[in-house]
Amino acid sequence: MQNSDEKAIIERVRLLRGQYAGDRGKSKFARALDISPSTYSYYENNRVPPIEVLLKICEVTGADLEWLLTGHRPEKRFAFGPNSVLLEKLDNLFANNPELTEAVLAFIELLCQKKGIEGEFHSEVLPPKPDRPGWIPVLGRTAAGMVHFWDQAFLPEPKQAITELDELVKKHIGKAIVGSVDGTVSIDLQALPLVDGIKRQSANLIQVCGQGQEQIVEFVQCEDIHKLFPDSFALHVDGDSMSPRINDGDIVILSPSVPAAQGQIGIARVANQIGVTCKLIRTTQKDAHLIPINERYETKVVAKKDLLWALAVLCHVSI
């Protein structure tokens, strides 16, 4: 659980992003920080960025590091430029009334639209497409977050999964695309006939607006994989226990119709544990062994009855 100090730092990061790139400028801000849009979105919504990212934020925005970490505002945060007085007044307003940030930025955005000077407020938004071929929803994270679509003990049947995933994609058709990053697909499943024709190719990580202004919903766009596995879904990988094969920040693609095979990489859900984990999976009559590739980590052994489900990692995407 985040403490109040962490939440306050994240709120100030969000404030600086809004001042620098606008309400829909997460992708632009991420590029300025030299990190991926998904990584930045994760920081803004879940965790205080590491110090090197905080320093980069201060460098890009001109903010004071002490203010960013503590909330104590320096005397001259905006010392130069023709709009320094206006920026300082806005800074005081947001610092004392952070709940007004979104409302003021929304007003500025509407004013820019009315005057025909949208400029950078919509520079990251691409025209929505009539359909979304090959969109695979990213539903959560391994080893950290709960998978919010398959958070029940038993997976849905493949046909039901296809229907539910299709409805999830349709729900976001027509919404503005706020980010798109190219990635490389690497095949992990050893049963190559299942993925015949997909040797190595590119994929896109697509980000669209969610239900709330700050919510970003992600999809992997790869038509070949989606055509073979229409019930497929994706998860972000947290941690380096499967490095160098699958690294921190990669995205793994799974299908509820393809269970994990002996000795192959899979995603496992264990009873009484939050979230899921990515490991090599071996089972015996009584136990399940969750084996990391990285030798710095130890193999975890659980009772086989506690292994609620395990799905094969079909491939992973490196962004």
Image: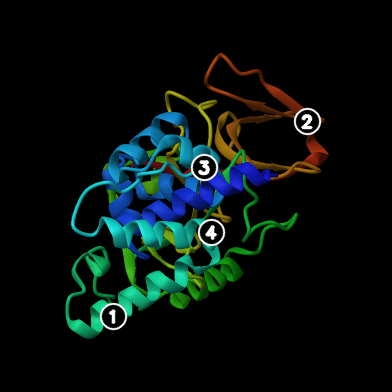
- Say left or right for 292 vs 16: right
Q: Are marks 3 and 4 in contact (CB under 8 Å)?
A: no
- Sequence-earlier tag: 2 or 4: 4
Residue 99 versus residue 84 in the image, above or below = below
- Say left or right for 271 vs 69: right
Question: Which quadrant, please, contains the N terminus?
Answer: top right
Nearer to us in this view, 212 or 10: 10
Q: Secondary structure at mark 2?
A: strand
Give the amino acid at mark 4: Asn
**CA–CA distance between discs 3 and 4?**
11 Å
Which residue bears the numbered disc 2?
302
Give the amino acid at mark 3: His
**CA–CA distance between discs 1 and 3?**
31 Å
Which residue bears the numbered disc 4?
96
Q: Secondary structure at mark 4?
A: helix
Q: Is residue 222 visible?
A: no
Q: Residue at the spot x=35%, y=44% of the render?
A: 76
Q: Residue at the spot x=22%, y=48% of the render?
A: 80
Which residue bears the numbered disc 1?
111
Specify the label residue 136 is tagged with: none
Give the amino acid at mark 2: Val
Give the amino acid at mark 1: Leu
**CA–CA distance between discs 2 and 4?**
51 Å
Judge depth for marks 2 and 1 and give the one in front.
1
Judge depth for marks 3 and 2 and give the one in front.
3
Judge depth for marks 4 and 1 and give the one in front.
4
Nearer to us in this view, 280 or 171: 171
Q: Could you classify mark 3 by the number of other residues whose Cα lies within 10 Å: few (under 14), some (14-19), or many (20 or more)?
A: few
- Sequence-earlier tag: 4 or 1: 4
